[in-house]
Every structure is written in C-alpha cells, then in structure tokens.
Image (spheres, rainbow, N blue to C red):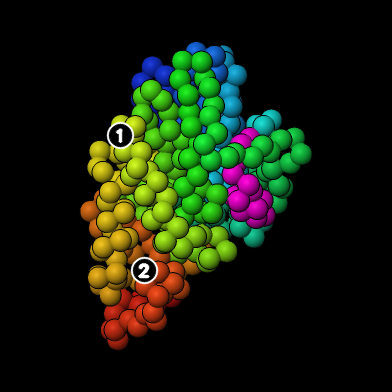
Amino acid sequence: MKPLLNEIVKLSEDCFRITETGSIHCYLLIGKTGALLIDTGYGYEDIRPFLRELTDRPITVVLTHGDSDHALGAGRFDEVWIHPLDYGKMKQNDTPERKRPMVEHRLKKMPELSSILDIASYIETPVLTDQTAIRFLQDGQIFDLGDRTVECIHTPGHSYGHMMFLEQPSGRLFAGDQLAQNHYIWHHLSADEQASFGVTLAALNKLKARADSIHQILPAHGASPADQPLIEDLYDALKYDLPKTWKNDSYIHTAMGDGYAHQYRSAWFYYNDARLEEYLGEPVHREKNSGSDKVKH
Ligand SMILES: [Zn+2]
Ligand SMILES: [Zn+2]
C-alpha cells in the first residue's frame, strides 16, 4: 500500500523525509533502540502504517510548533511532545474557524483531497482528543535513540514555543519553520502568535554559537536538506538588510493576514508593519504608490 497524500523519501539509511500534500516535510529518524518522528503534518492521512513499514522500534513524536501543518496530525498518535508555549496555538488551530479556510486553500491546490478525506468531518470534529497524551518539551532536553541523541533547542520567533531538533553525532538540524531556503517564512501574524524580530535574532544567535555542531539543515518547507547558509542569511537579513531596505518590499495578502514580503539571499519572509515598527523602534511610513497602494482585494 502506498500513501495517497504523503511522499516518503529516504535521505539516508536512518532518516526519512515524509512530505504531506507536497507542502510540509516531517522527518523520521531511526536509532538503534528507538525512533523519533519530527512533526505530524495536517493529519489528512494516517501515516502510522507507513511508519511501521520503515521501523519496528518505538516511535516518539515531537512537534516543532503548533501550526496546523505540523501539529494537527498529532491526533493520530497516543502521545505527542510540544513546547508548552505552543500548546494553545495547536488547540486554537483545531477549530472549525481555523480549519475551514485552511482546507479550502489546500483543496484549490489539490482537488483530489475531497475524494480521500471526509472534509466536513475533518473540519467539524476536533482532531486532538483525550486519546492523545500531551507531554511538554524543554530547551536542552535530550532524546536518546541508542546510537544517537536528539537535543531539543527552543528557538522562538515564528512561534513562541518553536523548537528545533539537533541530532548528534550527525549534526543534522531539523529546523521547522524558523529557517527555509527561498521559501517565505511567516512573521506577519499578530504578536499573540508570533514573537518579535528581536526574539528571532536571539534564537539565531544561539544557533550561531553552536555552528560547529550543525552540519546540515533540514527545514519543514522548501528545499531539504538546504544547501545555503540559512542561519547566517536570516540573521543578516534581519540585522542588517531589513532596516535599510524595507521600503522596497511589496504588499502581500494571505488567508491568515496581510503584510510585506522581504527577500535577502536565501532568507525570504513575510512580516507586518506592527512587527517592523516594534523592531525599528519608530513609526513606519510607506511611500505613496508603494506596493500597498497597488494591490486591491
Ligand atoms: Zn509554522
Ligand atoms: Zn509550516
């Protein structure tokens, strides 16, 4: 049996990339005594039988953060680990108000989803129930898989409870939504959901200090593994480029809110003016005839 909505790619003997609906990469690491699943996708399809074909070891499930594309599949598992600061976000995403526009967006790109998934039931019924035990991740926590360890690194920014996972001795960093290569990272949601750029920079500094132990970056979206210096590119984009060039950015509209799109080397992201003003410490005035005036909704 082959998955209908997931594509499974063997990256190495002990590491598989599982991509749901062509958009979100989850990863399965297989150690000597245990396996680790990083992120669960939207949960449109039950991936457990496919995971079982890849390993018979006990699988621990961890989430990089609470966004729908990473966390709603958690409802398929008995126990899931997430940072406490993103637990509320995960629950909020499991509501009809949030799920309806998300599924409609996916259906436009993938009409065949309607023949595979009971859409109404997915939207109306909570995916996360008491059947799934929630455990809370901590910064510095280690999962021991026998012949390797995986360290949890709290990297807030894209969300307050965002976590990355660093496998040793391989040096593979599973970066969630905090890093991506030529793929827009979201920073345009409200301060209720996403931290300031100052917080993101602090998380990037933490990673820069660990650069010697990071040998490869595997993001949750776009090219994976990445072949560009994603940590440096995003750091330089926020620290040096954005404050100088934000006026050139064009206006964007998404189902979850509007903002501006910034590109610097491999670091692409959306942001809004409230976040920019907080970061610059001064009001932001866009020129007339800038991108914001050209886009009509
Ligand atoms: Zn996200
Ligand atoms: Zn994502």
Choose between 28 and 111: the one closer to the eye.
Answer: 28
Q: Which residues are magenta?
A: 80-95
Disc 2 residue crowd, few under 14, some 14–19, many 20+, Cα 10 Å: many
Q: Is residue 95 or residue 230 the one in the foreground?
A: 230
Residue 120, position as x, y percentages in the image? 66, 50
Label disc, if present, on residue 48 of the rendered structure: none
Residue 24 in sight: no
Residue at figure coordinates x 43%, y 28% from the top left: 167
Q: Secondary structure at mark 2?
A: strand
Return the residue found at the far right.
130
Is 101 placed left or right of 16 in the picture? right
Q: Quadrant of the C terminus?
A: bottom left
Residue 259 placement (x, y as % from top left):
41, 69
Is residue 229 shown above or below 262? above
**What residue sits right under mark 1 in the picture?**
212
Can you identify the residue that label 2 sits on?
A: 260
Residue 134 in the magenta stretch? The answer is no
Q: Residue at x 67, y 32 (%)?
A: 79
Q: CA distance from mark 2 to mark 1?
A: 34 Å
Above or below for 152 versus 60: below
Q: Could one spot residue 129 in this view of the protein? A: yes
Q: Amino acid at mark 1?
A: Asp
